[in-house]
Amino acid sequence: MNKQKKTAALLITAIILGACSSGQNNKQGPARTVPVTVAEAVQKNVPVQLSNIGNVEAYNTVSIRARVGGELQKVFFKEGDEIKEGSALFLLDPRPYAAALRQAEANVARDLVQAQNADRDAKRYGGLIGQGVVSKEQYDQVRTAADAAEAAVKADRAAVENAKLQLEYCTILSPISGRTGKLMIQMGNMIKANDETPLVVINQITPIYVTFAMPEKDLPEIKRSRNAGAVKVEAIIPESTAAPVAGELTFIDNAVNITTGTILLKATFANTDRALWPGQFVKVVLTLSTRPNAVVIPSQAVQTGQSGPYVFVVKKDLTAEMRVVVFGSSHNGETVIEKGVKPGETVVTDGQLQLSTGAKVEIKKTERQGS
């Protein structure tokens, strides 16, 4: 009886062990293949760039004010018009100034006659003093009167020139070529000379400036690049499909801002297509130099973990290997790899979350990198 019990117990144990072994085998199963997208690490020349947000500024800004007062009779442009340098903008009532000019010219004519008479008297007295007919004091008085009359003529002529200027100022001309803004004072209003409120503001937008700041640590490299030649600057308009606007670095401020620790820079753009507009914010990319034969991979291949940045490399046997990398600058969706990946190796750009070292992969797509 005891022997039968032992045999039954051994049989039950064997069945249980067999079931457990079968369950473990089913859990392990065949190794799972992870579908991934890959790209090849390539070697090429990469621009060394700095970027920041910049602000577009007009190349020239002029606030137009009247030099003389009077009624605004005519406006020769419409708000937002493109105007040329020397174009007529406004006309103030010229009649009071024309009358003042005529009066000044009449004063010249009057005083000129008096001066001529005084000069003749002085010459006549000059001849008589030698004959003893008139005294020296009499001659000096006549000579002084003649000189005073001549000075009065000169003053009158200066008044004529001033009156001509005042009349000329009634027609206000544009000092620059540019685009007009909002008209601040309408036709028919009385204008004060040199009023605080300008009649209109004109912005020159071809060419145009973009101002931006860079950390002071980058100043030595910026100056080296500037000394070596023209430094290319690109302005990228947010949410625009247009190509970046090309310009050139033209100004480096003469002092670092001690509050922000940055240096102010300014780039000039031809802006013939009016793509840039004063007051606009743009992304500025400053190209300092070109790094030859750098190893680059798509930026999305670089992941961040507890050990730092890493990538998954697909080996020849289609297994994944995690590599810790040291990366450098990024440009146009590509990142320079300083250490960790060699040219020609294949890196995973999509599907990394399901990978671990040694995992089998299935390449579903190979991305092509730009040249």
Image (cartoon, rainbow, N blue to C red):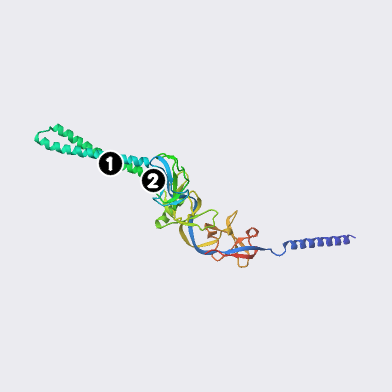
The answer to whether residue 154 of the structure is visible from this angle is no
Q: Count neighbours of disc 1 (C-alpha within 10 A) and say few if under 14, some if 14 to 19, many if 20 or more.
A: some
Residue at the spot 72% in from the left edge and 62% down from the top edge = 28
Contact between labelled residues 1 and 2, with CB atoms less than 8 Å apart = no
Residue at the spot 26% in from the left edge and 40% down from the top edge = 109
User: Would residue 67 appear left or right of 48 to someone viewing this image?
Assistant: left
Residue type, label 2: Thr
In which quarter of the view is residue 140 placed?
A: top left
Residue at the spot 40% in from the left edge and 45% down from the top edge = 91
Question: Would you name the residue on which mark 1 appears?
Answer: 157
The residue lying toward the viewer, choosing from 345 and 301, is 301
The residue lying toward the viewer, choosing from 224 and 367, is 367
Element carrying mark 1: helix
Residue 188 in the image, given as x and y percentages of width and height? 45, 41
Q: Which numbered disc covers residue 207? A: none
Return the disc, 2 or 1, that comes first in the chain's sequence.
1
The answer to whether residue 44 of the structure is visible from this angle is yes
Quarter of the image that includes the N terminus: bottom right
Q: Count neighbours of disc 2 (C-alpha within 10 A) and say few if under 14, some if 14 to 19, many if 20 or more.
A: some
The residue lying toward the viewer, choosing from 5 and 347, is 347
Residue 126 in the image, given as x and y percentages of width and height? 13, 37
Label 2 to label 1: alpha-carbon separation: 22 Å
Task: Name above or below for residue 176 compared with residue 151.
Answer: below
Residue 104 in the image, given as x and y percentages of width and height? 30, 40
Question: Would you name the residue on which mark 2 appears?
Answer: 171
Task: Name above or below for residue 201 compared with residue 370.
Answer: above
Residue type, label 1: Arg
Residue 305 in the image, given as x and y percentages of width and height? 60, 54
How many numbered markers are drawn?
Answer: 2
Question: In the image as oriented, which residue stretches furthest toward the bottom?
Answer: 316
